[in-house]
Amino acid sequence: MVSKFPAKATAAFCLITAGCFSSQANFHPFSDSSVCEGILRSSRAICTVAITVADYKYSLYGLPNDCDEYRRLLSEVHLRSAKRLLKLCEINKGFYVKAGQFVSSLRQIPKEYSLTLSSLQDQVVPYDFKVIKEVLVSNLGQDPSELFTWFNEQPIAAASIAQVHHAMLKDHQEVAIKVQYPGIEKKMKLDTRIMYSLAEFVAWFFPEFRFLWLVSEFTEAISLELDFVQEARNFETMSNNFRNNKFVRIPRIFWDLTTNQVLTMQFCHGQKVDDVVFLKGMKINPEKVAKKLLEVFAEMIFIHGFLHGDPHPGNILVSIEGQGGFSLVLLDHGICKKLDEEFRLEYCQLWKALILLDSRKIQHLAERFGVGKYYRYLPIIFSGRTIDSKSGIGKGMLVEEQKKMKQHLKALEMEDISSFMESLPSNFLIILRTDELLRSTVSKLGASKWVRLLTYGKYASLGLSLKSNPCSGVTNLVLWMEKLKRCLNKFYGKMSAAGKEAICR
């Protein structure tokens, strides 16, 4: 297949491939063994991407991109390529698995990729406890036997960058100890460096397929996860934000046993938030859990402006403890984002405009976010409605509306998607990813789509009230409810009137 490419393309491919290998060999912070391991992983990645580029070029060669045959073949190539990437991630493991999971949580990539890569799990073989013990001793200054009454050498969880052990302190407090794997930061630097090179390589062959924004976001997220001291601070910030919420539990940090590589926190019992069998067995309504989950994250985004950016089910437990019959335990605060106040308010305004379908306001805010050209797609992305929809909130789309949406989406090209994602501010990208993870969990819990829309509309309205009442804080939530109720009644009154008008027509 490569032989069919122009000589310039073939030569460039060889040069880039050679450059990728040489950049690894000259990356000084690594030992010889880690360089060899990195070259092995990276050579697989280079070969996978090279074959994928060849597949796209050869399979779609000579076809106009506006014909049905092109779209059919493009979907087939997407699927083949996604399967190759899945295999690459499974073999290379580590950061490649996390990268695949990161990509699968984005709706803005072709569905063939997101659906295929969503099967990735952190199937990590735990490190031998001798290695973990060395990290503990070097960071805490004492042998575990001197610090704990007992320490379970078998991890209760193992992921790409760390594993977690269960132990009990001398004062009989149960703790969970997250221990970072030795040398993981060096591996991260090598793997992300090759990912950048590959993204540039793909963009050279396919200018419309630009993924540097994705690699940049992933690298930033992983870098945040490696700083356990910052994660501990995030735990405390989140705990303070939800100190008066009876449905939220944040494990307490033990600072005297926390370093950059070791994080010691209160041990909390519970099951994954999407474990419907457990919830029903404990007579906990899954839909109520879904509603509370949405309310918690809506409060983070619209009220606090401090967001937990990795809400996959393994990071959120349902505990049977709590005044409301259950509580949500929020774990793993490595990827947290502080939203600046201007963005928080504008995002609140966007959701108010989405609920009211205020097209002028949506266009204005899209321009503020740097994506004014694509303002018509924001309602589709967030609420599943077109910008000129006549259907009420939470209702299904009319047949005519469905046709229009298909036409809009059919007109989109990869260049549009790349341009849209590149233009979005970083705050917006983490919200998009978080929202997609929440949608998946809420769907598994059996909650209807309108619950999310109403919850976000409600908290967006509340978030806007903070601008004129900055001293109130979350502790005065009850005092705002009457004002919020009046505002929401106004919203839904307009939507109801619009619905009745559409029926009369």
Image (cartoon, grey):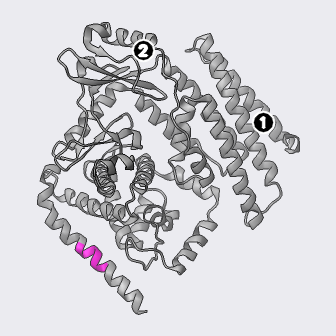
Left or right: 336, with 388 as reference point: left
Q: Where in the figure is residue 386, as x and y percent of width and height?
A: 48, 72
Nearer to the camera, 6 or 411 = 411
Residues rendered magenta in the picture:
489-494
Residue 34 appears in which quarter of the rendering? top right
Provide the residue designation for mark 2: 132
Residue 194 badge: none
| Residue with the most extreme bottom position | 504
Residue 203 showing in the rendered view = no
* Tags 1 and 2 touching, CB below 8 Å: no
Q: Amino acid at mark 2?
A: Ile
Relative height, residue 461 to residue 157 (above, below)? below
Q: What is the secondary structure assignment of the residue under circle 1?
A: helix
Left or right: 319, with 127 as reference point: left
| Residue with the most extreme front position | 281
Residue at the image point whose x is 62% and y is 11% from the top: 32
Q: Which of the two discs, 1 and 2, sits closer to the camera?
A: 2
Residue 309 appears in which quarter of the rendering? top left
Relative height, residue 340 to residue 198 (above, below)? below
Residue 460 showing in the rendered view = yes
Residue at the image point whose x is 65% and y is 49% from the top: 209
Q: Amino acid at mark 1?
A: Ala
The span from disc 1 to disc 2 (Cα, nearest Å) is 44 Å
Residue at the image point whose x is 88% and y is 45% from the top: 4
